[in-house]
Amino acid sequence: MVRVFHCDDSSAFRVLVREMLHDLGGVELVGEAGTLDEALAKLPAAEPDVVLVDLFEPTRRVGLLAELREAAPGARMLLYTGMPEEHVPAGAEGHVHKSVPFESLHRAITDLAAAPR
């Protein structure tokens, strides 16, 4: 099982992703957060393999991934956003656009977790 923590400011989208991951299997959602502060508080105890990140809180984008990585040093960062790849900050191990089918997101999560470090 791949342990995933999902950070997204949309509660409705978090519910949708939660249900999708459950239905597709092989992935365990170990936590969710709607703000960066909430994510930073919950991440250490969650011990995720992958942190699924939407770029919420535009005023805090700079350093966002570094802060998440500090809270979950063993996890890989997968950006899951509506932004084009050229506009997302460096530092993530992967990027998936929110327009792709959920099966593609699931595959990106499992592939990233299985990739050699």
Image: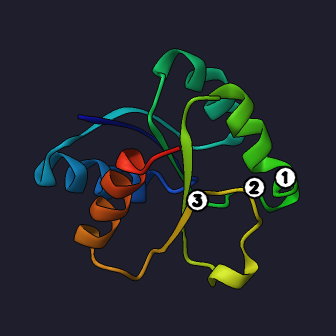
Q: Answer yes or no: do the residues labelled 2 and 1 have beta carbons within 8 Å?
A: yes
Could you say whether the residue bearing mark 3 is in a helix, strand or loop? loop
Q: Residue 11 location, x and y as percent?
A: 45, 51
> Is disc 3 surrounded by few (<14), some (14 to 19) or many (20+) residues within 10 Å?
many
The answer to which of marks 1 and 3 sits earlier in the sequence is 3
Q: Is residue 111 above or below residue 5?
A: below
Q: Residue 24 location, x and y as percent?
A: 14, 54
Circle 3: residue type:
Asp
Q: Which residue is mark 3?
A: 54
- Residue at left offset 58%, top offset 53%: 9
Could you say whether the residue bearing mark 2 is in a helix, strand or loop? loop
Query: Residue 60: which disc?
Result: 1
Q: Answer yes or no: do the residues labelled 3 and 2 have beta carbons within 8 Å?
A: no
* Image position of 35 (left or right of 52): right
Q: Quadrant of the N terminus?
A: top left
Residue 2, picture quadrant: top left
Q: Residue 83 location, x and y as percent?
A: 63, 79
Query: Residue 57: which disc?
Result: 2
